[in-house]
Image (cartoon, rainbow, N blue to C red):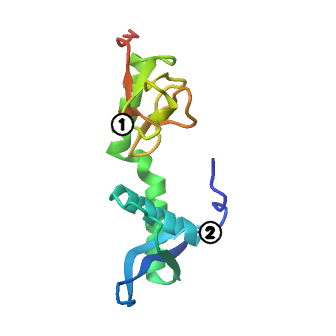
């Protein structure tokens, strides 16, 4: 599903964190110039990077201001290049091969156990079944849809509970 503001042109925003120390003095930490259709999308991209770094509250005090000139052109070009060419990377090819191997060995409807997942309370014993073939979504993750959860589950968190079915072709 496309985001609400993706029809707008890309703009560049400097994302920074404004905070005050114990003396009341203002401090600023810059997360760089990021592209987005809105300031909120640029802040969300910075927050996503902070989540992967283990930050507990990624949105706390994040601000953004519009950037023009050469820095803006570079940020927008980098953003467009990342979206344009990720399907041609080795990481995506590896994940695509992993998803295809999963599909060959375990057909749709295979019982699986979900491990190391914050949504495990959806299944009391962590056991469910697959409802779609696996697919590579980006150069970072391969997914498979399971019963009881909308969207996809990271393939690394899915453990099949039956022996693989070897399909000879």
Whole-number angstrom distance, CA of label 2 to CA of label 1: 39 Å
Answer yes or no: is residue 97 visible.
Answer: no
Which of the two labelled residues, at mark 2 and mark 1, occupies the earlier sequence position?
2
Q: Which mark is residue 163?
A: none
Q: Quadrant of the C terminus?
A: top left
Is label 1 in a helix, a strand or a loop? loop
Badge 2: residue crowd in 10 Å (few <14, some 14–19, many ≥20): few
Foreground residue among 60 and 41: 60
Residue 69 position (above or below residue 49): below
Residue at image point 48% right, 54% down: 84
Answer with the quarter of the image where residue 115 lies. Answer: top left
Residue at image point 47% right, 63% down: 45
Is label 2 in a helix, a strand or a loop? loop
The residue that mark 2 highlights is 9
The residue that mark 1 highlights is 116
Residue 98 position (above or below residue 48): above
């Amino acid at each position: 599903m496309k985001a609400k503001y993706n029809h707008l042109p890309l703009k560049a925003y400097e994302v920074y964190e404004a905070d005050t120390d114990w003396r009341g003095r203002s401090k600023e930490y810059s997360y760089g110039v990021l592209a987005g259709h809105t300031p909120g999308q640029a802040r969300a991209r910075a927050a996503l990077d902070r989540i992967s770094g283990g930050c507990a509250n990624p949105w706390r005090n994040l601000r953004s201001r519009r950037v023009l000139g050469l820095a803006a052109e570079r940020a927008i070009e980098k953003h467009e290049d990342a979206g344009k060419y990720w399907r041609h990377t080795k990481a995506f090819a590896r994940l695509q091969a992993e998803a295809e191997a999963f599909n060959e060995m375990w057909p749709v409807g295979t019982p699986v156990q979900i491990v190391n997942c914050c949504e495990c309370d959806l299944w009391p014993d962590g056991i469910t079944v697959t409802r779609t073939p696996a697919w590579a979504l980006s150069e970072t993750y391969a997914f498979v849809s399971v019963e009881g959860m909308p969207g996809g589950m990271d393939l690394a968190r899915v453990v099949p509970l039956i022996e693989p079915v070897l399909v000879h072709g």
